[in-house]
Amino acid sequence: MAVRIICIKKDDGEHENPYVAIDHLEWVNDRIKVNGITDRTKIHDWIKNEKGEAYIMDQFGNKTYLIPAISPKGNKYVKTVIDETVMDSLLMLPECIL
């Protein structure tokens, strides 16, 4: 199953990196028309351990897939870039209204 990430919910406060500030991700499964909200660590585990696919789609229909990562402090998170040399489209998504 693949889901499209449509927005992110961040918490306030100081974090070791901007990805760890993301608490939840809102998604939609376009194939079966189901929406949901999942916390950052569950999305990480789903992609890493269950071969789940989550992506962001740009205005041209191009998909960028999320990859799982773990911070130096052991916090699980997801991102769309291998390294932080380019802006991550995940961080540019709008804030979810939960």
Image (cartoon, rainbow, N blue to C red):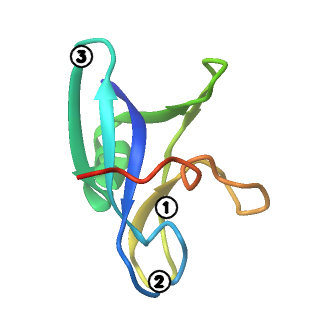
Mark 3 or mark 2, which is nearer the start of the sequence? 2
Identify the residue under disc 1. 69
Residue tagged by mark 2?
Answer: 15
Helix, strand or loop at label 3? It is loop
- Mark toward the viewer: 2 or 1: 2
Q: How many marks?
A: 3
Direction top: furthest residue: 31
Circle 3 is placed at which residue position?
A: 33
Foreground mark, 1 or 3, reads 3
12 horizontally vs 18: left or right: left
First in sequence: mark 1 or mark 3? 3
**With respect to residue 6, does 34 lie above or below?**
above
The numbered disc on residue 35 is none
Distance from Cα at disc 2 to Cα at disc 3: 34 Å
Query: Distance between the Cα atoms at labels 1 and 3?
Result: 28 Å
Residue name at image x 43 percent, y 72 percent: 21
Q: Are marks 2 and 3 in contact (CB under 8 Å)?
A: no
Amino acid type, mark 1: Ala
Residue at 54% x, 49% y is 90
Give above or below for 10 relative to 34. below
> Tag 3: residue type?
Lys
- Cβ–Cβ under 8 Å for marks 2 and 1: no
On-image quarter of the N terminus: top left
Local crowd at mark 1 within 10 Å, few (<14), some, or many (≥20)?
A: some
Give the mark nearer the N terminus: 2 vs 1: 2
